Image (cartoon, coloured by chain):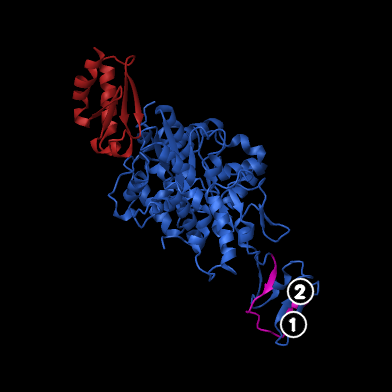
Chain colours: A blue, B red
C-alpha cells in the first residue's frame, strides 16, 4: 500500500487508478462495468455484507471518478448505499459502566429513559431520550458518551443532516466543498468528484504538447506530499504523464501577497481570498462582509491568468490538496484560466495507472516561488507573507494587525466578531482546513510531520523575497 | 520582434533572471523598446539546453555570460 492515511483513501485510489488506466488505453467504455469486479473479485466479502453490495458501491465510486453525473453539479457527493447509517446522535452507555449502586444517571434523567439490567448496568431507552446529556455529565466513570456521526462531527458548518432513509445528506446552500466529511467518513460514503478523465483527455489531445502546451500548476502543499520520493522525482513523474512543465502555484501566492499588501493598506480591512472554501463561507453565511473579501484571485488563478495572458495555446491543470478548488475552477472568474483541478490523491492514481515508480526517476527541479509564496500552504503563512509584502514595499503608514484562522471554526469566530465590528484585527487570514492546505482533504497524508516537511520546502526556495520572485515575470 | 525567455524552474536555476536582465539592458542601450517585445514562458520544451530563449519562433540556448554576445550576434542582425 502507498502512503495513505486510511483504507478508505486506498479504496478510492484503486478506483481512480483503474478508471485512469482504461482511459489511457481507450478501453474505458467497454470495461467500465468490469471495474467493480476487478477490485472485488471472488465471492468472499471483505468490507460489507456481501460482494454484491461492495460492487454496487464501487460502481458509484466509478461514476464519481468519471466526473459524476450532470444532474449533480456539486463536487462533494454522498453515496447513499455506502452510508452505514452510523448510530447518529445519541447518548450511549459504554462498557465502562460498572453497574454501580448510586445510579446518578437515573436520577439525572427527567424523562425516565434509563433502566438497569440484572448486573445494574444502565441502558438508555432511545424512544424516551431527548439528548439533554445530563446522564453523561453525572456519571462518575464517564461511561455515557454522545455518539455523533463522523461526517456531522467533521462538518463544522453544519451542512450535513440525516435524510429519511437515515443516510447522510448535504445541504448545498451551506456546503463549501472543503472535503472534511470526505476525509472523515470511515465508510467512504462521501466522496469528491474527480476530473481525471478531463486531464487525461487534455494530455492525449495535446499530442505530446504539440497541439497546445499543458502545464501542471502544483500547490505549495506538495512539499508535504508524496514524500516517499524526492520532490524532483515527483516533478519528473508529472512531466512523464505528459505535462510540458510544472509551475508552482506559490508564485501566484507571491503575486497575491504583493497585491494584497497594497490593497489592505488602501482599504484598511480585508479578508484573504486564497482559500475558496473560506470565500464561499463568507458569501453564504456573512454576505454583509463580502465586500471586505480581497479582490485578488486565488494564487492558483492569479498565476494561471498570468500564464494564459503571456503564452498562447496553453492548458492548465491544477494539482493540489483541495476539493474546494474543484468548485473554484468552475467559477466564471476562474474558469477561463484553469482547465481542470485534481488532488494529490488523484495524482498518485495517475502515476500508478501508468505503472510509474517515481522513485526510480531522475530528479527534475521545481523553483519559481519565494519562501513566502511557499508557506501559504500552512496556517499563518499568508499573514507572514503579507507582513513581508508591506515591508518590501516600504508601506509604513499602515499598521498591520493580522489574525490567522486555522480551520473553519476559527474563521467563524473571527467573522462573527468582524460582523459585529469588534474584531481586534484588520486582516483575516482564513483557512477552512485545520493546519491550512497541508491539512486539505485531497492530501495523501496529513499530520504533524507534514508541517515540518512544508516548512523545509519553503526554506529551499532559491528566491528569498517576494519582490525577487515576481521580478522574474516580464510584464 | 518578440523575445521569449524561459522562466521555468530549470532555466530559472540556470540563471534566466540574469539573461532577462541583460537582454532588457541591451534593449535599453540600443533604444529598441519600440521594436522588441520581451516576454516570458514557463517551458519552451528544451530544458536541458536552458536558458532557453526564443526569437520569433527560433530557439536559442543562452547562458548569463553569453547573453550580451547573443544579443549582438543573433538579435541585432535580425533587425537590420
- Callouts 2 and 1 on one subunit: yes
> Which disc number belongs to residue A116?
1
Find disc 2 in the rendering and name its residue: A125
Q: Quadrant of the C terminus of chain A?
A: top left
Q: Which segment did they paint magenta?
A: A89-108
Question: Badge 2: few (under 14), some or many (20 or more) residues near its Cα, within 10 Å?
Answer: some
Q: Secondary structure at mark 2?
A: loop
Chain under label 1?
A: A
Rendered position, A125 above or below A411: below
Nearer to me, A122 or A270? A122
Crowding around mark 1 (Cα neighbors within 10 Å: few <14, some 14 to 19, many 20+) is few
In the image, which disc is placed on residue A228?
Answer: none
Q: Is residue A118 visible?
A: yes
Going from N to C along the chain, the mark reached first, 2 or 1, is 1
Q: Residue at x 52, y 59 (%)?
A: A36
Which residue is most to the top? B80
Across and down, in percent, residue A62 comes to: 54, 53
Seen from the viewer's position, the closer of residues B36 and A235 is A235
Q: Is residue B47 magenta?
A: no
Amino acid at each position: 500500500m502507498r502512503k495513505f492515511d486510511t483504507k478508505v483513501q486506498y479504496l478510492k485510489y484503486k478506483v481512480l487508478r483503474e478508471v485512469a488506466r482504461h482511459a489511457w488505453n481507450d478501453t474505458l467504455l467497454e470495461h467500465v462495468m468490469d471495474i467493480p469486479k476487478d477490485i472485488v473479485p471472488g465471492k468472499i466479502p471483505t468490507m460489507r455484507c456481501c460482494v454484491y453490495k461492495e460492487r454496487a458501491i464501487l460502481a458509484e465510486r466509478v461514476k464519481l471518478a468519471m466526473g459524476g453525473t450532470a444532474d449533480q453539479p456539486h463536487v462533494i457527493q454522498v453515496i447513499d448505499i455506502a452510508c452505514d447509517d452510523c448510530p447518529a446522535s445519541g447518548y450511549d452507555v459504554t462498557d465502562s459502566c460498572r453497574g454501580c449502586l448510586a445510579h446518578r444517571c437515573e436520577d439525572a434523567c427527567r424523562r425516565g429513559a434509563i433502566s438497569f439490567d440484572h448486573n445494574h448496568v444502565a441502558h438508555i431507552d432511545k424512544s424516551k431520550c431527548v439528548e439533554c446529556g445530563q446522564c453523561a455529565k453525572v456519571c462518575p466513570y464517564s461511561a455515557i458518551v454522545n455518539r455523533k456521526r463522523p461526517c456531522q462531527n467533521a462538518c463544522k458548518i453544519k451542512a450535513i443532516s440525516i435524510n429519511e432513509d437515515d443516510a447522510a445528506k448535504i445541504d448545498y446552500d451551506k456546503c463549501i466543498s472543503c472535503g472534511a466529511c470526505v476525509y472523515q467518513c470511515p465508510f467512504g460514503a462521501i466522496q469528491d468528484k474527480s476530473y481525471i478523465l478531463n486531464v487525461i483527455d487534455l494530455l492525449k489531445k495535446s499530442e505530446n504538447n504539440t497541439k497546445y502546451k499543458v502545464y501542471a500548476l502544483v500547490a505549495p502543499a506538495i512539499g508535504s506530499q508524496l514524500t516517499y520520493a524526492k520532490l524532483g522525482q515527483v516533478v519528473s513523474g508529472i512531466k512523464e504523464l505528459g505535462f510540458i512543465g510544472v509551475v508552482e502555484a506559490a508564485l501566484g501566492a507571491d503575486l497575491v501577497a504583493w497585491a494584497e499588501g497594497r490593497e489592505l493598506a488602501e482599504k484598511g480591512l480585508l479578508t484573504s481570498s486564497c482559500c475558496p472554501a473560506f470565500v464561499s463561507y463568507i458569501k453564504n453565511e456573512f454576505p454583509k462582509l463580502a465586500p471586505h473579501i480581497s479582490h485578488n484571485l486565488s494564487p492558483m488563478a492569479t498565476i494561471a491568468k498570468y500564464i494564459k495572458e503571456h503564452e498562447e495555446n496553453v492548458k492548465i491543470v491544477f494539482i493540489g490538496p483541495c476539493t474546494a478548488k474543484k468548485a473554484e475552477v468552475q467559477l466564471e472568474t476562474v474558469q477561463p484560466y484553469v482547465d481542470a483541478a485534481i488532488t494529490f490523491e488523484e495524482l498518485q492514481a495517475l502515476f500508478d495507472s501508468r505503472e510509474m515508480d517515481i522513485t526510480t526517476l531522475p530528479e527534475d527541479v521545481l523553483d519559481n516561488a519565494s519562501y513566502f509564496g511557499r508557506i501559504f500552504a500552512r496556517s499563518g503563512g499568508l499573514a507572514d507573507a503579507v507582513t513581508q509584502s508591506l515591508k518590501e514595499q516600504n508601506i509604513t503608514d499602515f499598521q498591520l494587525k493580522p489574525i490567522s484562522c486555522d480551520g473553519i471554526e476559527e474563521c467563524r469566530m473571527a467573522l462573527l466578531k468582524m460582523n459585529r465590528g469588534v474584531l481586534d484585527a484588520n486582516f483575516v487570514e482564513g483557512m477552512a482546513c485545520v493546519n491550512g492546505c497541508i491539512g486539505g482533504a485531497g492530501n495523501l497524508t496529513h499530520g504533524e510531520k507534514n508541517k515540518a516537511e512544508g516548512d523545509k520546502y519553503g526554506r529551499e526556495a532559491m528566491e528569498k523575497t517576494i519582490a525577487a520572485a515576481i521580478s522574474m515575470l516580464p510584464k | 520582434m518578440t523575445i521569449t525567455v524561459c522562466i521555468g524552474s530549470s532555466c530559472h536555476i540556470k540563471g534566466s533572471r540574469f539573461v532577462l536582465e541583460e537582454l532588457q539592458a541591451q534593449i535599453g542601450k540600443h533604444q529598441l523598446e519600440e521594436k522588441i517585445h520581451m516576454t516570458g514562458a514557463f517551458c519552451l520544451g528544451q530544458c536541458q539546453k536552458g536558458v532557453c530563449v526564443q526569437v520569433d519562433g527560433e530557439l536559442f540556448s543562452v547562458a548569463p555570460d553569453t547573453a550580451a554576445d547573443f544579443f549582438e550576434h543573433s538579435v541585432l542582425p535580425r533587425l537590420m
